[in-house]
Image (spheres, grey):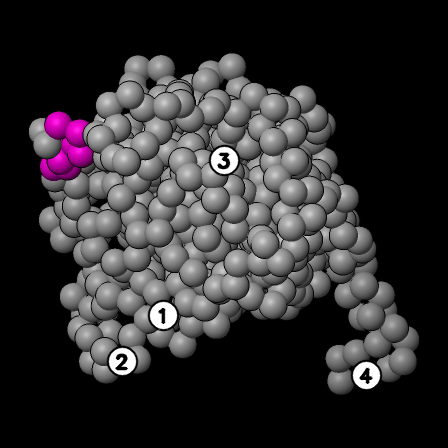
Amino acid sequence: MLFSSPRSRYKLRLLVFSFIFVYFSSLAEKPLNVVFFLIDDLGWMDIGANGSNYYKTPHIDQLAREGVRFTNGYAACNVCSPTRAAIMAGKYPARLLLTQWLPSGRWDAEKNKLQEARYLSNLPLEEFTVAEALREGGYKTAFMGKWHLGPLPYYYPEHQGFDINVAGRDYGAPGSYWYPFEGSWRIPTTDLKVFKESPIEGKEGDYLTDRLMEEGDKFIRENSETPFFLMMSLYAVHTPLQGKSEKVARYEKVPEEQRQGDPRYAAMVETVDDGVGRLMTALREKEIEENTLVIFTSDNGGMSKATDNSPLRANKGSNYEGGLRVPVIVKWPGVTEPGSISDEPVISTDFYPTILGATGLPKRPLQHVDGVDLSSVLKGRSRIDRESLFWHYPHYNQHPQSFPATVIRKGHWKLIEILDTGDLELYNLALDVGEQNNLADVHSGLTQSLLDEIRAWRVEVNADPMRSNPLYEGE
């Protein structure tokens, strides 16, 4: 019988061990690929791994079981463009002078007490993006989906470090999720409409999220032999709320009192999850899953008309947790302990230095100045050497519970300075994640200390201030 003798069995074990050694040695020598899933408007509670019993996200939940899930993950802003700029540049939006979604247009000269702070209409080309750093390090770089960081002809992804740009445009939402993906959008300040052309080729019956995932799948399979950085920056689950009919029908069968959100939105979330599964399958089939860093997050909290962010307060556009806290999952095979959970506060600016740290490329400390390499946390060795996180949103918008503010989180404490009233709100997030009990007067000393830190930080990053509005018709 084959391998029946002790000597034969010894030779077999030696052969197997040699194969395993060579295999993992080759992985160690091969550069780490990076796949970054950036979902638009996905709320913190909109995945099963974070506690949702309504949304069906088995593939995203599997990522969490295989990697590290951060329970205190944050977007750099409560709206999209600033967060996206922070991911690309590794800097706070206030430091970038890009603190508002583009092109904005919801300030009202007669109704708003202060003039909005100034902000750029694009991510400056002078910023050396994470994509540029990876490309300089020998990576093939691809961007797919929502860009929203500047217009043609100068500010598209191909000018910011990406070899390939699929569907990246200046606008923040498609005209439609169904082919030909066209539609119109009413500009808030003028009521005039702009026509949104198709961002990607397709055919009748195509759904935009599927088309983007199809292109992502193709990119992985065609570049599996070379190190790559794939940025899957989906338009979903942003409005318009358009889900696949068969999925929508299943969520409509759920009694209204048991729904967490609009059935159309739920269908969109599930389709995103399907796409995550498709790309993970591509990595497995090309035998590079164990050599690929996967990051999953969102650009801001869930939209009020689409989902319920409870137990968090408020929604997209707000400075409360519902607008800022987002899903964050990182899978680094062979490094992250599967199923790990970290309560360490992390933010969008951290991804840039973390990716460089994981891939072994040189850090860019003068570029990702506001980010922290999370490698030590991902390895389960230590906590982050950082005391505070900051947000600066000197703007008005029409989302519920929205107001201009500067925010600091330090430990479990969060202070909100409302810029047009001067009011202060202090919350202990460890005891009051829903931000229902304002403790600013109870802990006046702490409130003043955090306010002093906010003011010093604004000076440090040269945050543009709000100014008096002479046209204001209020009191």
Rendering coords of residue 302 (x, y %): 37, 55
Disc 3: which residue: 392
Q: Is residue 55 at least partly visible in the picture? A: yes
What's the residue at 52%, 25% (across, down)? 463
Task: Give the camera-side residue of 276 and 154.
Answer: 154
Pointer 1: what residue? 55
Left or right relative to 111: residue 465:
right
Q: Nearer the viewer, mark 4 or mark 2?
A: 2
Farthest right residue in view: 7
Q: Nearer the viewer, mark 1 or mark 3?
A: 3
> Left or right: 209 with respect to 244?
right
Sequence-earlier tag: 4 or 2: 4
Q: Which residue is mark 2?
A: 257
Coordinates of residue 83 in the picture (x, y in percent): 46, 38
- Spot occupied by residue 113 in the image (x, y as percentages of width and height): 32, 32
Quadrant in which the C terminus appears: top left
Quote the CA–CA distance across marks 1 and 2.
14 Å
First in residue order: circle 4 vs circle 1 = 4
Dot 1 lies on which element? Answer: loop
